[in-house]
Amino acid sequence: MKRLILATVLSVLGVTARAEVQIQQVTSPAGINAWLVEEHEIPFVALEIYFKGGTSLDEPGKRGATNLMMGLLEEGSGEMTAQDFQRERESLAASYGFDAYDDGVSVSAKFLTENRDDAVALLRQALVAPRFDQDAIDRVKGQVLAGIASRKTDPNRIAGDSFYSEAYGDHPYGTDDSGTEETIRALTQDDIFKAYRNALVEGRAYVSAVGDINAEELGQVIDNLLSGLPEDGPAVPGAVDFGLTGGATIVDFATPQSVILFGHAGIERDDPDFFAAYVLNTILGGDGPQSILMNEVREKRGLTYGIYTYLVDKDYSNMWLGSVATANEKVGETIDVILDNWARVATVGVSQEELDNAKTYLTGAYPLRFDGNEEIAGIMVGMQVQGLPPEYVVERNDYIEAVTLEDINRVAQRLLNPDALHFTIVGQPEGVDEAMLTDVGEE
Amino acid sequence: MLRSLAFSAALAASPAVAQDVSTFQLDNGMDVVVIEDHRAPVVVHMVWYRRGSADEPVGESGVAHFLEHLLFKGTENMAPGELSETVAANGGSDNAFTSYDYTAYFQRVAADRLPLMMQMEADRMVNLKLSEGDIATERDVILEERNMRTENNPSALAREQMMAAQYLNHRYGVPVIGWKHEMETLSLEDATSFYDLYYSPNNATLVVAGDVDPTEVGKLAQEYYGAIPRQENLPERIRSQEPPQTAARRLTFYDPRVSQPYVARSYLAPERDSGAQEKAAALVYLAELLGGSPFTSVLGMKLQFDTNTAVFTNASYSGTSLDDTTFNLSVAPAEGVTLQEAEDAMDDAIQSFMDTEIDPDRMEAIRTQLRASEVYALDDVQGLANRYGAALSIGLTVDDVQQWPAILEAVTAEDVKAIAAEVLDPRRSVTMWVSAEEESAE
């Protein structure tokens, strides 16, 4: 039997907490790699599988196929109809989650030790022998269509759809991955099978498990679940630049509070300046110590319930995004405050105290993330997808600590650009500078 | 079918997973619950006040939640925002929430920082310092919060109307965040009078969960919270109760932003009471049987599988409530199905449930899942902390919380039928149609 276990005892050292996770690198008999943390105190296992690719693999004219397919994996497989499958799952008290994202699809499972073999066998059936019966396709299409219809009247969704469409155009990132009414209605059973073969690819799978299971048992579980899936999948889309320029887009929508999404290009995860940008985002608009934007927009002026910024690193593009909602009559003032602070941080920078506070928070908060089997399984799959080694859990805080005031202010100057910031506003905003308007949409 | 029975038997034989829970009371009347989980060096520290929006004075709706926001302003010993800043500087996170029956504050942080958390939380229990400036700005913030959660969300606006129709005389009919016109007039005095009376140790429960030693927590609690005098004038918790409902109530809610019409139905239902949780337990099964899973529940099977009547169906019930709660159903009609047809199909499904024996396999499947959920719950220490904090805020005891799984386990099909007959009474129902415009509701 070919099985290799590399056990690394890793202590996640924070300023205040020290979490120990013992990550084992397991290679299954069939040669599939996985990360494992044994935790035998509670008799269940949390398993996380991520297949790179995702809804960006939708073929032209088939937008929504991958998302619909993932929704159908629990709707019948092998000899079982959807209802047979769910009755069996309920009797095992196992839970399976099937989710679709831009860059990957994920399968999450929780099952009890005492019926692990049966719970794994049932999940295997869903993964390797889905039925995609026409009646199930029609039923789930109805649910997806209801979701698509409700997007059209949800200000948050309208803002996202408008923003991404203007930023990415024809690239898959430019359209919502649940598809359109037209594409969903046109999808056939063959389209669903095709999306299935494209997305659930053994060679693109990343696996982790946490809980009451050892390396040998996990190896068997993985082979059981994944053997039989295709070795390789279709080409993935190419890189795409963030295509929006500075200014504002207003989408008229009758609602008392405008929803605003704003942003410009961001930074790659493997850029040497990534950690400086990450710490900078925490200071500018992250959670943790009160951010500059939260202080200026909420605490001082009462303009909003919350304002946040995020670094978004997708496989084929990246963004620095923010979101805020404010009463229509306060939109002009809110945007002015954001632009002023964006410009101030870009030119003047942040203070040593702000940097120190952010570092203490980030390094202290990191070990607290490892607080449950499901959480740890999710973190470990994320690390594998990003190409990080198990040791990263120990080294991560050192990367944060290494960021200097000089670094962060250089990166602020390099990346923060108020002139490039685009605001997409859904509502009936007042006081928006006419010169900013690049486009006035109609809902 | 045989297989599912075999699995249930196997599960029944599995050893019970015990929770390490200790409980005691300080001399000033503050209840303390300690839940041990030593898997990670983390602690969740929570203080629950046994007052929420349903305890607010008339005309001041939203003041409990407003005060919750104001507790993040300064005290005599801490600058505004200092508490959250200090938690963050220690790598932790903090927040608070307000419900009908309680207001709770919590921090999640490295376990060795527990004394600091207690020091700060005890400080703001007695030393809050507010200015008129805080009031004006923070009132704008809660109005924006209402805009975000409610005004921008037609389902939330509809739910508000439905609750108002369900509760004629009880404060559950008033939204937790408050009616907008009353929120706009909330004053410093409104906030401080709620604070002075109700933010007291004898009206609070401390829950500490994580990598801690109960004896040590007891000493710390005595040191930080034990020093605060009890509020001798704490009034008895008296609320106006609902009169018997003798007429079905109906609402039609129109909002052009509704893209998927639906029918919502609620019935007044008993909640979990100390020493008497059996009816609530039977209602948990009833919700699962009627509308828990779209694949195996009565509504799901009849409206989504046997016929193409609905795109979504649901039944829900939560018994964690001080006074009478509700049992809720909802159905979103499929394309080409009217709201009247959807409602008729829902009522037919309920009637056929009443007229038919409950499938023993379904009872066992629900029992198995409830039992397993106790195993999965052990992986979430904050969830366990919430379970105890909420229960103790609504008049349940630690013993009630620990009995609950066994009471759920013992529910029979007969119990479910009996509670269904009691609760699902058409004359005691509230039914709401939600759609974009009147035409589509024909």
Image: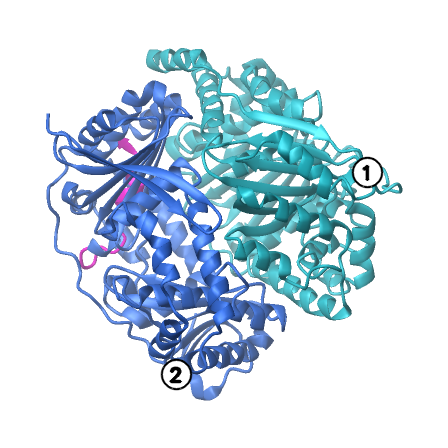
Chain colours: A blue, B cyan
B390 in relation to B184, above or below: above
A362 in relation to A121, above or below: below
Q: Quadrant of the C terminus of chain A?
A: bottom left
On residue A419, which mark appears?
A: 2
Give the residue pinned by disc 1. Answer: B237
Residue B159 counted in the magenta span: no
The quadrant where residue B35 appears: top right
- Residue visible at 32% across and 24% down? A84
Residue B344 visible in the shown view: no
Q: Quadrant of the N terminus of chain A?
A: top left
User: Across the whole image, how many numbered discs are drawn on residues?
Assistant: 2
Residue A65 counted in the magenta span: yes
The percent coordinates of residue A363 (x first, y second) are 43, 54
Q: Is residue A185 left or right of residue B38?
A: left
In the rendered structure, the residue with mark 2 lies on which chain?
A
Q: Nearer the viewer, residue B284 or A297?
A: A297
The percent coordinates of residue A21 (x first, y second) are 36, 38
Range drawn in magenta: A58-77
